[in-house]
Amino acid sequence: MPQRHYVACDLGADSGRVILGTLENGKLALEEIHRFPTGALPVRDTLRWNILRIFEEIKTGLRLVAKRNLKISGISTDSWGVDYAFLFGNEPFLTQPYHYRDVRTDKGFEQAFAVVPKKEIFEQTGIQFMTLNTLYQLHADLRERPEILNLSEQFLCIADYFNFLFSNVKAVEESMASTTQLYNPTTHAWAKPLIEKLGLPYRVFPKVVPSASILGPVAPTLAAELNWQETKVVATCSHDTGAAVAAVPGEGDDWAYLSSGTWSLLGIESPTPIINAESLEKNFTNEIGVGGSIRFLKNIVGLWMVQESRRTWTLAGEKYSFEELSHLATEAPSLRSLINPTCPRFAKPNDMPKKVADYCRETGQPVPETPGQIIRTIYESLALLYSLTLENLEHLSGRKINRLHIVGGGGKDKLLNQFTANAIGRPVYAGPMECTAVGNLLIQALALGDIKTHADLRTIVRNTFPLDTYKPENEAVFAKARHRFAKLPVLD
């Protein structure tokens, strides 16, 4: 096969990248062309996304790619889930999109469950309950700014919004639609009975397309600017986790994945949704992936706690790199104090070190004081939570899990990877770190016929990217700590 080039616009909650991918001789080469901050925009006591600035940053990267004078076969965007932009007429958007950490959905559960029972929502969507989900955001729009809903013609989730700007095609890709808690993974359609019962206007819900769908050519104005008249805009997996899971280099069906970054997404691939009383009780989720597969997973507050701790120390004049923090954690005492990362406090911004210390104080444990102690507490607690989650995955799916693949930026942290292997008692394989971008690029290749099957896609990943292996150590010590961890309370 001749050389093929694709562009991935990979948007994270903190930063975005424009990445050039080159597929040749069964291997994929990546080149980061442009990196830029995304981040929350505080405006009048709200948190928003400055999506026009993000779009201009993306275009800066695309112009740099265009200077290479390469034939670009495809372009696609992936991003975080749940957030959205309202469209109206020829306006770029109706209002600046809200950030999922905005406080407007803090009471989302009680307000939504007063209209539709929790059990009924789960039966129709199979999605785990988080107040940041699109369902609670749209319900907040209905209560607090109905005039916006009345004016809106459609909404598009963030990555799909940028694909619309590239192609002029309004559509939400299925992996992204499934994160909203308003999509039915069994019928593969918007959960219309739920939407109508909530009082949301069904007309604002866009058409849904499967992953690996070609939306069309690049919009004329942009195509002329970049000289990309033959380039196709592809809806790969618009949800970044969907893209990452598509590129996990697993074989067989006895493995689980952990997409490790700001969030930790721990799960398996399943041919069908697992929607029952137990998966509801354990708050697992059924999101859709390539080929209509189900990503049965648990969404866990992940390295966000480290990111927020680092931000707090930076504001206080103590600047640490992530590598320095990991080194300091190596020197801190082992399993001295533990937290329960599922506590709502740890999902909120501001002064994470104080939140960690307060939790330990409130639960009668030694209070971590130094940055190394704080980070080690977070790392060991996450590893133990992964262990319990993996146990629940095996029980709910009836599947034996023999190994864990860690992908994403968190896979660079050798200390956390080793703690994870110790806690789960199974080997851990880390890589590729750029799995979201890899998935985005290779799903484009799949959509455009340059790769024949999803299995071929994963073969390319295995042939291209080396994996780091971590074998379990100190299993008895971590097993004892797991019993202690399991008893920790969930505190507000």
Image (cartoon, grey):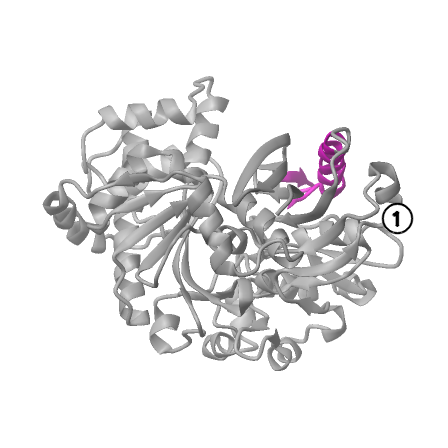
User: Which residue carries the number 1 mark?
Assistant: 220
Task: Kindly identify the residue that appears in the image at 25 percent across and 65 percent down.
Answer: 400
Q: Residue at 41% of width from left, 61% of height from top?
A: 297
- What type is the residue that disc 1 sits on? Pro
User: Is residue 59 rendered magenta in the image?
Assistant: yes
- Quarter residue 310 falls in: top left
**In-image side of 184 versus 224 (left or right):** left
Left or right of 344 on screen, residue 138: right
Residue 278 visible in the current orientation: yes
In the visual, does 432 lie left or right of 221? left
Answer few, some or many: residues within 10 Å of disc 1's Cα (few below 14, many 20 plus, some between 14 and 19): some
Q: Is residue 481 above or below residue 289?
A: above
Q: Position of residue 81 (x, y in %)?
A: 58, 55
- Look at the picture and state if 449 lies above or below 112: above
Name the one closer to the observer, 113 or 33: 33
Comparing 66 with 76, the one in front is: 66
Stretch of the chain drawn in magenta: 40-65
Where disc 1 sits, the SS reads: helix
Q: Is residue 234 magenta?
A: no
Say which of 4 and 151 sits in front: 4
Note whether 322 is above or below 104 in the view shown. Answer: above
One can see residue 102 in this view = no
> Residue furthest toward the bottom?
193
Res 191 → quadrant: bottom right
